[in-house]
Image: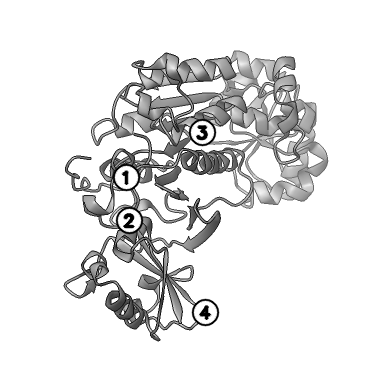
Amino acid sequence: MTFREVPAAEAVALARDGYRVVDVREQSEWDAGHVAGATLLPLGEVSQRIGEIAPEMDAPLLLHCAVGGRSGRAARWLAGMGYTNVVSMKAPIGHWKEQGGEWEEPRGLLTPAQQRRYARQTLIPEIGQEGQRKLLDAKVLLIGAGALGSPSALYLSASGVGTIGLVDDDVVEESNLQRQVLHGVNRLGMRKVDSGELTIRGLNPETVVVKHAERLNADNVERLIAAYDVIVDGTDNFETRYVLNDAAVKLRKPVVHGSIYRWDGQITTFVPFEGPCYRCMYPTQPPDELAPACSVAGVLGVLPGVIGMLQSNEVFKLILGVGDTLSGRLLMFDAMGTSFDEVRIWRDPACPACGEGVESAAVTRAPVAAGA
Amino acid sequence: MSTVRIPPVLRENTGGSRTVDVTGSTVAEALADLFDQHPGLRDRVTDNGELSRFINVYVNDRDVRYRDGLETAIGADDTVILLPAMAGGAS
């Protein structure tokens, strides 16, 4: 039936030793900054909800509030309920920070300029200022700053995705301009990552553009994707798609997949270990004659616009954590008939990348397509 | 009659047709009728009599790999979708 009261230095040490930190202040106080890893349990809810936080009566609990008054009362109650290892920090919370305790600053609200700029989407209940903050904090990597990358780059930056990485080692050519609307005639010969950066900066100077002027391959893929939250796959060949898939599964990065051919496009979202991956859908790389590139087969200009825009839509939902993504579904668009079809795709238990028994993929490299 | 939907990369073998009406009560029978009508498709969709490993076959929205394979039953209103991977994107 006892509890201890300790100064801040000892509280910090106990937290590092594994004591569960319980903040008994109110939500508004919590929102202004709180101990990292702590659980919020306002004083008025302690007796009803402590069981959720500490089902075991001998759980090591470190309670704190603003100065030690409320946490002392809470600690006395808990000891009375039979908790045997309860400690209350009897010190102003500022001492916790001075003693080097882990602290999480409040997430900044939007600046007045951001509130104006993003007003039309923060009005949407599923987004709001909190969702906009998520978008501003998000890092999205576009594999390819070409046909599919263009609409994603334009709309993701315009609507405030904070960091956009561009992976592309090409320069802008005249034959690109019919569909690669990130670029223009005054950029011919310029690296696509540089041209892309100029366009994005023009749309939204706040966007951080990270330029990766290289071609994604098995040696650089993990380095390229590691820092990003969502990957948008708009590559032009199978080798890259398999390399990307295996690394994304290993690092558990969601990949929004799009592909286009003349009048037809496909799109799906791969969320590692939650839904199927690319190898679940297509275990084997097709021969080249079944997979001609745009440069050989041709592609309708608006097609990557439609598919790329649907990819952006997936990115928004993944970042915001709302809605239903295309995980487990392949959506097919037929521009000639203006029709959409959908088939289900399943996780393959025998998948070499994400199948049963595969925790993190150590997959052999995809066979190399000649002339990809 | 069931309908087989032909993917873009195989339409050169169907004279440009995007769909082909076929008879048959299983996927195998439907494909056999398809190959009778468009013989050029046989070697592109099958490999030594087996379904090619890089073409997925769906009945409506279901992958036949997770049903009864080529013996999956089909009815008159069903659509068989042949779906090879598509690579095209950025370049």
Q: Amino acid at mark 1?
A: Ala
Question: What residue is shown with label 3?
Answer: A152
Q: Secondary structure at mark 2?
A: helix
- Residue B7 place in picture, x, y as percent: 38, 60
Q: List the residue tagged with mark 1.
A: A297
Q: How is the image coloured?
A: one colour
Q: Which mark lies nearer to you, 3 or 2? A: 2
Q: Which residue is mark 2?
A: B9
Q: CA distance from mark 1 to mark 4?
A: 33 Å
Dot 2 and dot 1 residues touching (CB under 8 Å):
yes
Q: Are marks 1 and 4 in contact (CB under 8 Å)?
A: no
Q: Is residue A273 left or right of residue B71?
A: right
Label 1 and label 3: CA atoms lie apart by 23 Å
- Residue at 50% across, 50% down: A335
| Residue A355 can be seen in this image | no
Residue located 60% across and 25% down the image = A158
